[in-house]
Image (cartoon, rainbow, N blue to C red):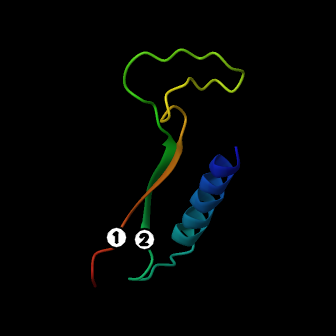
Amino acid sequence: MKLWYQVQRQTKVFSVMKQNGLSNKYLPQFVMSGKIIHSGPCRKPGPSGNCDNPWCGTPVLITSQLAKQ
């Protein structure tokens, strides 16, 4: 849960920066955030909803570099 909270907070920071027109060639550009859904069958045994696959439900924050201006 802690890692998912960090991804959500970073997503919020990137969104606020974009809304305010803040950009810099040294800062990454926000692309997407979410949780990984692994390929193959997923058996969800626990209350967290994640199975025993190590990638199941892993939070991710995807960024890209800004083009040089």
Look at 53% across and 40% down and name the residue there: 58
Res. 57 image quadrant: top right
Amino acid at circle 1: Gln
Instruction: Pinpoint residue 60: horizontal percent, then vertical percent.
Output: 50, 49
Q: Is residue 50 above or below residue 29?
A: above
Amino acid at circle 2: Pro
Question: Contact, CB < 8 Å: mark 1 with mark 2?
Answer: yes
Is 46 displayed left or right of 64 in the figure?
right
Residue 65, disc: 1
Instruction: Name the secondary structure under disc 2.
Output: loop
Q: Is residue 1 above or below residue 43?
A: below
Question: In which quadrant of the rendered image does the C terminus lie?
Answer: bottom left
Q: Look at mark 2 in the image and give the residue it sits on.
A: 28
Look at 68% across and 20% down and name the residue there: 46
Question: In which quadrant of the rendered image does the N terminus lie?
Answer: top right
Q: How many marks?
A: 2
Mark 1 or mark 2: name the one nearer the start of the chain: 2
Q: Is residue 47 above or below residue 20?
A: above
Instruction: Pinpoint residue 33: horizontal percent, then vertical percent.
Output: 50, 49
Is 16 displayed left or right of 28 in the figure?
right
Instruction: Pinpoint residue 48: horizontal percent, then vertical percent.
Output: 69, 27
Q: Residues within 10 Å of mark 1 (few under 14, many from 20)?
A: few
Instruction: Pinpoint residue 5: horizontal percent, then vertical percent.
Output: 68, 51
